[in-house]
Image (tube, helix red, strand yellow):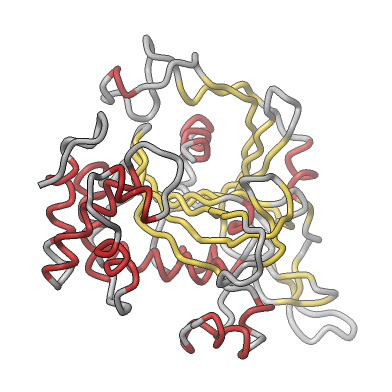
Amino acid sequence: MLADVGDGLGELDGWLEPFLGVMGRKTRREWAPFYVRGLLGPGERKSLQPMAARLGLPGHDQLQHFIASAAWDDAPLWTVLAQQADRLVGGARAYLVIDDTALPKKGTLSVGVARQYCGQLGKRANCQSLVSLTLAQGEVPVPVGLRLFVPEEWTGDAGRCARAGVPEAAMTPVSKGEIALAELDRVRAAGVRFGCVLADAGYGMSGAFRQGLDARGLRWAVGIPKNQKVYGIDVQLVPPQGRARKPVPSEEPRAAEDVLAVRPWRRTTWRHGTKGKLAPYAAIPTATRSEPCGSFARFAAIRVRVADGPVWGNNRHLPGRETWLVGEWRTSGERKYYLSNLLPGTSVRALATAIKAR
């Protein structure tokens, strides 16, 4: 049906088959492979006319019709993608990685575009921000979710949203953490299997996000800011004194960096090169392993209770659940901090392996 336009695309038709089966109309099933091949094939310009020319089509009208046709339900496609990803890398040893994906934009008309942090540029810039979910095992990542975050300057301007064609349901303010949890529920319902959820501090700093993972019975390891407040594991609630009306903690919460500053930091290796062990996925074929030698840093870990319970005074929070507080001291001198609800007996190496799987 399609002429081969480059190495690696010869099996595209077979790969697309389960997706085409849920696309409904015959014309969609017929033209979707052309469009996908045009996107994946050579050439920098991905507009319809040059794509059609490279594909050997007499014109671009049919591709235009495929793109411009009325909106249709893409949920079946996402379900197939989730199932195919699970078939490739799903299982108890897989990780589900939640992250941001930014698309720099110069204009102001694209839905959700605003001045916000852009990871691609490493700074705040005009861009769209999307919440991404990736299923990964070993060194093989497969994207399974991508949803646009609509910032408040859009959701608070009904006229702007209407002009851009934003559905009314999408005009309700929703945080990135809420989007991530909804997407997580969707991929689980589609049958995606994984053993641990990973996220950076942009998500991990949210107590509501961490509690949402706990409520779903999931294991997780997430980044946090260095000033995240935590309590010692033996903290107690004591009877109120003076004007206090409710029990208060037996100690003041402390910043994560202060708690770990006095802990021993030990060199820990979480991955070795192609001739050695690749933790935790030693069975991955050599051809898929990366070339760098073993990766290492210094780590410190301690069990704590996070200050993410109800507010009890001066914006201080009561102790929440018991978790691991982990610090990473990189060879560059930079320090990063994490929380994880992995089991109490988990080794520092296993904690590091989970954290660095992102």
Q: In the displayed orientation, state which residue is furthest to the front.
A: 58
Q: Position of residue 308 (x, y in %)?
A: 66, 67
Q: Residue at x 55, y 68 (%)?
A: 149
Q: Residue at x 38, y 13 (%)?
A: 274
Q: Residue at x 37, y 32 (%)?
A: 139
Viewer-side residue, 339 vs 60:
60
Q: In the displayed orientation, state which residue is furthest to the right.
A: 242
Q: Position of residue 317 (x, y in %)?
A: 73, 70
Is 99 situated above or below 5?
A: below
Is 315 situated above or below 95?
A: below
Viewer-side residue, 102 vs 339:
102
Relative to 219, is 326 on the left or the right?
right
Relative to 122, is 92 on the left or the right?
left
Q: Residue at x 81, y 61 (%)?
A: 252
Q: How many marks?
A: 0
Viewer-side residue, 33 vs 286:
33
Q: Position of residue 109 (x, y in %)?
A: 61, 72
Q: Position of residue 267 (x, y in %)?
A: 61, 21
Is 53 situated above or below 292?
A: below
